[in-house]
Image (cartoon, rainbow, N blue to C red):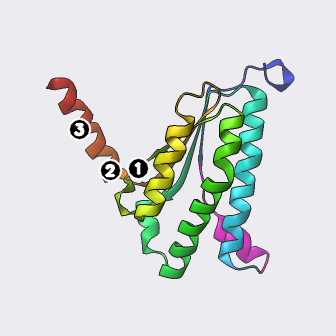
Amino acid sequence: MSEGNCPAPQHIAIIMDGNGRWAKKRHQPRFMGHRAGVKAVEDIVAHCVKLDVAVLSLFAFSSENWRRPSKEVSLLMELFALALKQQVKKLQKNNIRLQIIGDLDRFSAGLQKQIKQAQELTKNNTGLTINVAANYGGRWDITQSVKQLAEKVK
């Protein structure tokens, strides 16, 4: 039971948007907003575990985000890799399952390997499931749906 005796939602989805605006409002570089976003996710995950939420989906990096300045994209990829490295053991310790969804082919080989290892380490965890949508978009969603449907028909 969640606070106030209302049942907790089983699935919460968050579109992670506005980090750059948050930083700009505080006269900080955009990257600081992204770092603050990572901290906010840590807090949200802790609350989801406390409230016994089953699934948390985070829409983190859409396919359109590749159009951002290359330096910002590079920093975002470094932040993604660093967050994975720092958090995967904590996820495992807290019985949290991590799934990264989206078209991962565009990420560096090193980041793809890191994602695969994190998912493999946490795949049997039975607590909160965190879905992180990375390099996702409408076309990717449609393509995945068609592939799944084709497999069922096959």
Residue 23 is a magenta residue: yes
Q: Which residue is mark 2?
A: 140
Residue linked to disc 1: 102
Quarter holding residue 28? bottom right
Work out how far the residue at label 1 is from the one at label 3, CA to CA, in angstroms.
14 Å
Closest to the observer, 136 or 121: 121
Foreground label between 2 and 1: 1
Residue 83: quadrant of the picture: bottom right
For image coordinates 40% across by 62% down, the residue present is: 109
Q: Position of residue 150 (x, y in %)?
A: 18, 32
User: Are there few (<14), some (14-19), or many (20+) residues within 10 Å of tag 1?
Assistant: many
Residue count near mark 3 (Cα–Cα under 10 Å), binned few <14, some 14–19, many ≥20: few
Looking at the rendering, the stretch of residues picked out in magenta corresponds to 15-27
Q: Residue furthest left?
A: 154
- The quarter of the rendered structure image containing the N terminus is top right
Q: Can you say which quadrant of the picture contains the C terminus?
A: top left
Query: Which amino acid, by three-letter code, is at mark 1?
Result: Gly
Point 54% across, 27% down: residue:
124
Q: Earlier in the sequence, mark 3 or mark 2?
A: 2
The residue indicated by pointer 3 is: 147
Marks 2 and 1: CB-CB under 8 Å? yes
